[in-house]
Amino acid sequence: MLKANYHTHTKLCNHAEGMPEDYIKEAISLGFKELGMSDHGPVPREFMSEEEYLNNWIQRNMTLEEYYSIYLPALDEAISKYGSKIKIYKGLEVEYIPGHEEYYIGLKANLDYLNLGIHYFLSDGIEKNSYDDVNYKTIYDYADIAIKGMETGIYNCLVHPDLFYFNYKNEEGKQVFDKHCIKVSHMICETASRLGIYLEVNANGLANSLKYGHKDEWLYPRKEFWEIAKTYPNLRIIIGADAHKIKNLYSADVKAVEEFAHKLGLKVEDYMKI
């Protein structure tokens, strides 16, 4: 059974529920030893055009003011209240936009860790969406951002690293885990292994796959990706609930992902070293 989770959201991202205390109380009841709160971090509007900002749904994220006035105080209060019962880590899930490293370092100054989530990536000078805009050409731009982000040394974990397959299209417009997907998988796994950065097997991918009409297969975690990942003996792997609801901290989907990892023979670590 899962002993810890480091991918946990709150209502401040405007597509989840609850606040840190709600998840912490649930984690304690489940017998978790550690919990990392990692809601979607604020992104200043000046980092991209207004169109890019809206197309990538960034307006949903907490604002910088909410980060300082609500999120951090809520975490500190919860740690004070429950810190004797469970180890609580303060984190965020943030993107990597090259040229803004100092901003991310500034956010992390108040935190224990940062998760890197590639929900959008720069391609031909435009911020493309990882759910809609990945094809046999742009997949390398996705990989480039993931690799450059990991190489900054700012991030502890690359969450849902196989998100690139969500709506991937090959040269014929079909969704096939092809040579480009294989190459990018190796690029990501090699970098994470070399740098000691965790890759996350993401349980929320099951619900997202079903939501978009894929009943019989998971778009992510994608089996082909993780079959490649297990060939890297030093790769650090963690399971993440990516909980947007309190009940999702240890849901049937998390259990299914645990079984998936076990059957594949992945060397999953119980805890993320922070």
Image (cartoon, grey):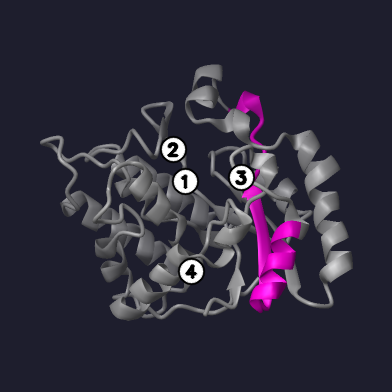
Residue 215 visible? The answer is yes
Indicate which disc residue 239 carries.
Answer: 4
The residue depicted at 37 percent of the width and 59 percent of the height is 188
Q: Amino acid at mark 1?
A: Ile
Q: Is residue 269 above or below residue 90?
A: below
Q: CA distance from mark 3 to mark 1?
A: 19 Å
Q: Amino acid at mark 2?
A: Phe
Are the residues tagged 2 and 1 within 8 Å (C-beta)?
A: yes
Indicate which disc residue 121 carries.
Answer: 2
Q: Quadrant of residue 115?
A: bottom right
Are the residues tagged 3 and 1 within 8 Å (C-beta)?
A: no
Q: Is residue 75 magenta?
A: no
Query: Would residue 112 be found to the left or right of residue 155 on screen?
Result: right
- Residue 274: x, y in percent? 66, 70
Q: Residues within 10 Å of mark 4 (few under 14, many from 20)?
A: many
Q: CA distance from mark 4 to mark 2?
A: 24 Å
- Residue 126: x, y in percent? 42, 26
Q: Which residue position holds label 1?
A: 118
Q: Residues within 10 Å of mark 3 (few under 14, many from 20)?
A: some
Residue nearest the observer in this picture, 142 or 132:
132
Are the residues tagged 3 and 2 within 8 Å (C-beta)?
A: no
Q: Nearer the viewer, mark 3 or mark 1?
A: 3
Q: Which residue position holds label 3?
A: 16
Circle nearer the N terminus (4, 1): 1
Q: Nearer the viewer, mark 4 or mark 3?
A: 3
Q: Is residue 80 above or below residue 173?
A: below
Q: CA distance from mark 2 to mark 1?
A: 7 Å
Q: CA distance from mark 3 to mark 2?
A: 23 Å
The residue depicted at 53 percent of the width and 30 percent of the height is 57
